[in-house]
Image: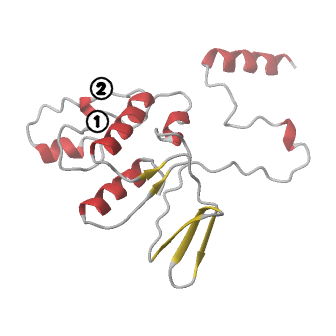
Amino acid sequence: MEQEPAGLQLGYFLQQAGREYLIVEAGDSAPLFSETFPRHRRLISINKPHTGCDDPELNLRMDWNSLLCDDPRLRFPHYTERYFPDADMMVQYLADFAAAFGLRIASKSRIIRICRDGNFHASMSADSATRRSGLITASGLAKPYVPPIPGIETADCMETLSVDPRELSTARADYRQR
């Protein structure tokens, strides 16, 4: 599993159930995907720290960013009151969640091969492998697919386009002048 929200959430529940698991993260310690995306660094999932209600069930339903756990202090609305929060707050939140529960994470690691002969064999390097009866992937970011189309190298990739609206306006004006 990768150290993104889905991987951390599942790791938490597997740990609570006393099951063995390992979250594999390509990045250092913070979630690699969440450090990069969204590129404009603002979440589109709303944050409602003030619902006007004391019902914890309703408040949790209005909370689109928190991971589920038994510690109410680890709810995302405690990190910021912004309606559309900064993505860096999510990075911090996910790192704190993982640390609070001591989730088993192999950072700076990648699974390079998976095979199955009744059990799954996942290799992280030539000399490091694990054998398990189950395997769950929450893989986060993948490399973009670039189709074999003549001239594709002249197109801009979404991953590298500027998210600055002023640059977009300049590019649009340049295009109109052609």
Taking depth in this image into account, of 60 and 176 the one nearest to the observer is 60
**Other-residue count near label 2 (Cα within 10 Å), few / some / many at <14 / 14–19 / ≥20:** some
Disc 2 secondary structure class: loop
Residue 76's disc number: 1
Choose top left, top right, bottom left or bottom right for residue 163: top right
Residue 80's disc number: 2
Image x and y of residue 160, in percent: 70, 32
In the image, what residue occupies the spot 28% across and 48% down?
Answer: 101
In the image, what residue occupies the spot 47% across and 69% down?
Answer: 135
Q: Amino acid at mark 2?
A: Thr
- The answer to whether one can see residue 114 in this image is yes
Image x and y of residue 31, in percent: 47, 41
In the image, what residue occupies the spot 31% across and 48% down?
Answer: 102
Q: Do the CB atoms of the residues marked 2 and 1 lie less than 8 Å apart?
A: yes
Image x and y of residue 168, in percent: 68, 21
Locate residue 74 relative to residue 107 in the image: left or right.
Answer: left
Indicate whether 93 appears above or below 103. Answer: above
Residue 138's disc number: none
Taking depth in this image into account, of 145 and 94 the one nearest to the observer is 94
Tell me the quadrant of the picture where the C terminus can be found.
top right
Choose top left, top right, bottom left or bottom right for residue 15: bottom left
**Other-residue count near label 1 (Cα within 10 Å), few / some / many at <14 / 14–19 / ≥20:** many
Disc 1 secondary structure class: helix
Q: Amino acid at mark 1?
A: Phe
Image x and y of residue 122, in percent: 56, 68
